[in-house]
Image (cartoon, rainbow, N blue to C red):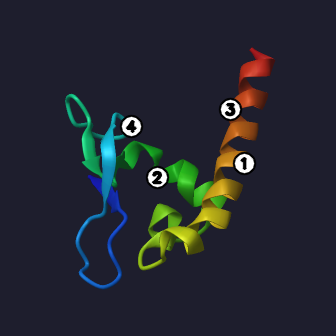
């Protein structure tokens, strides 16, 4: 099980397209990249999102615009980076 995250046009509800392909990788990835503003996040990451975002995990951003979700996602990234760096430093 996984989550597909996309940015959608607020008027047409179509997935927004980048000018050039991106190769971000999550649960799945598009060979040779994709221009869709899409990322699949594997369920294996869910416990980390619940820990840093809260009860709904990554689903907290569902229904938000990209601009609305950015402060929360930046904070989550910071918390996840701190956790990874601290664990890496102790080994």
Mark 3 neighbour class, 10 Å CA radius: few under 14, some 14 to 19, many 20 or more: few
- The Cα–Cα distance between marks 2 and 3, rounded to whole angstroms, is 15 Å
Q: Secondary structure at mark 1?
A: helix
Query: Which residue is painted at 22% across and 28% down in the image?
Result: 32
Q: Which residue is mark 2?
A: 46
Q: Which residue is mark 1?
A: 79
Query: Which residue is painted at 23% across and 72% down in the image?
Result: 14
Extreme residue toward the front, this view: 19
Asked if marks 1 and 4 touch (Cβ < 8 Å), the reply is no
Using the image, determine if residue 58 lies above or below residue 36: below
Give whichever of discs 3 and 1 has the lower sequence position.
Answer: 1
Q: Which residue is mark 4?
A: 24
Q: Position of residue 62 (x, y in %)?
A: 42, 74
Q: Looking at the rendered structure, which numbered label has been put on residue 84? A: 3
Horizontal relation, residue 19 to residue 84: left or right: left
Give whichever of discs 2 and 4 has the lower sequence position.
Answer: 4
Give whichever of discs 2 and 3 has the lower sequence position.
Answer: 2
Foreground residue among 66 and 84: 66
> Which quadrant of the view contains residue 55?
bottom right
């Amino acid at each position: 099980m996984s989550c597909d995250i996309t940015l959608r046009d607020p008027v047409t509800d179509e997935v927004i397209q980048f000018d050039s392909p991106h190769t971000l990788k999550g649960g799945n990835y598009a060979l040779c990249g994709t221009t869709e503003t899409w990322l699949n996040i594997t369920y294996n990451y869910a416990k980390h999102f619940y820990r840093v975002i809260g009860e709904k995990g990554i689903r907290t951003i569902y229904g938000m615009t990209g601009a609305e979700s950015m402060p929360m996602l930046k904070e989550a990234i910071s918390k996840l980076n701190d956790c990874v760096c601290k664990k890496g430093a102790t080994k």
